[in-house]
Image (cartoon, rainbow, N blue to C red):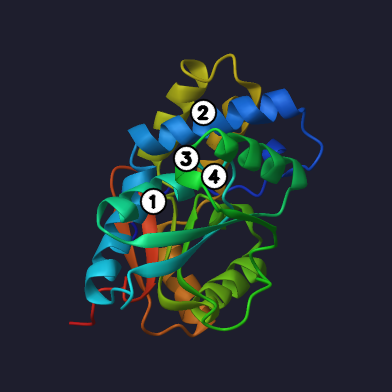
Amino acid sequence: MIRLADRCPPSDLPERMDRGDQDPDLLDRALDALARANRRFGGTRAVWRPLARALERRPPPSGELRLLDVGAGGGDMGRELGRRMRERGFAPRLLLGDPHGETLRLARHRGDRNDEAAGARYLRLRAERLPLRADAVDFVVCSTTLHHLEREAARSFLREADRVASRAWVVADLRRSWPAYLAVRLLAHTLWRNNPLPRSDGPRSVRRAFTPGEAERLLVETGLEDARVRPAPPFRLAILGGAAAPPRR
């Protein structure tokens, strides 16, 4: 059954931040806005909760681990996850990956001002073809990137995350729904009214995103039978693989 809230119509309109020629100052301001939105509105929580469960189920034996953040943007999510891991006694090595060179440059600059990013590596990569061998990292995480991909690329990325992560992977994104769309429209007219990139891209992001049923069908198409889709309130969902996926009942 399709819930009424999930009947927000989809869209394939491109987002301005997907272009590689954005003004650096505007892009940096947009990355700041996205980082704050993740902290305030559940984006960080959507990734951290299943990742923390995976750490409990399959902790690295030495305490050292490798974490790949795909579509890392300004790197704020990866740095925050690294900080929380260190608080729990782990020693993470961060790999922050993004397809856009200017975004990576800004992420590196932002990381230079943050001790949590010491030793991080910055990789220019495409989600659908990760330049890493099988089981190259312990964990793969991704936040609000899946909806930027065309459907075949999204399928390829989920398979790649499963291939590269030896322990678990978490792909969190917006959930296409009327409540999410209205909330982002409100942000566009208030907090983001003077920030042109998130003001225009925010509503498009929601309409490009998946409903839970569509995410489930995407998993069926990938053949990843052990992965799961779970809600991440208030406006997100998470696709979970490896030790992050709850066991089948």
Q: Is residue 220 visible?
A: yes
**Residue located beneath label 2 in the image:** 33
Q: Is residue 73 above or below residue 248?
A: above
Dot 3 amino acid type: Asp
Dot 1 amino acid type: Leu
Q: Secondary structure at mark 2?
A: helix
Classed neighbour count for the residue bearing mark 2: other residues with Cα under 10 Å, few (<14), some (14–19), many (≥20): some
Image quadrant in which the N terminus is located: bottom left
**Residue located beneath label 1 in the image:** 81
In the depicted view, which residue is nearer to us: 224 or 116? 116
Furthest-right residue in view?
A: 21
Between the residue at mark 4 and the residue at mark 3, the CA separation in whole angstroms equals 13 Å
Rendered residue at 28%/68% (across/down): 55
Rendered residue at 71%/54% (across/down): 99
Earlier along the polypeptide chain: callout 4 or callout 3?
4
| Disc ID at residue 115 | 3
Between the residue at mark 2 and the residue at mark 3, the CA separation in whole angstroms equals 21 Å
Tell us which disc is closer to us: 3 or 1.
3
Earlier along the polypeptide chain: callout 3 or callout 1?
1
Dot 2 amino acid type: Ala
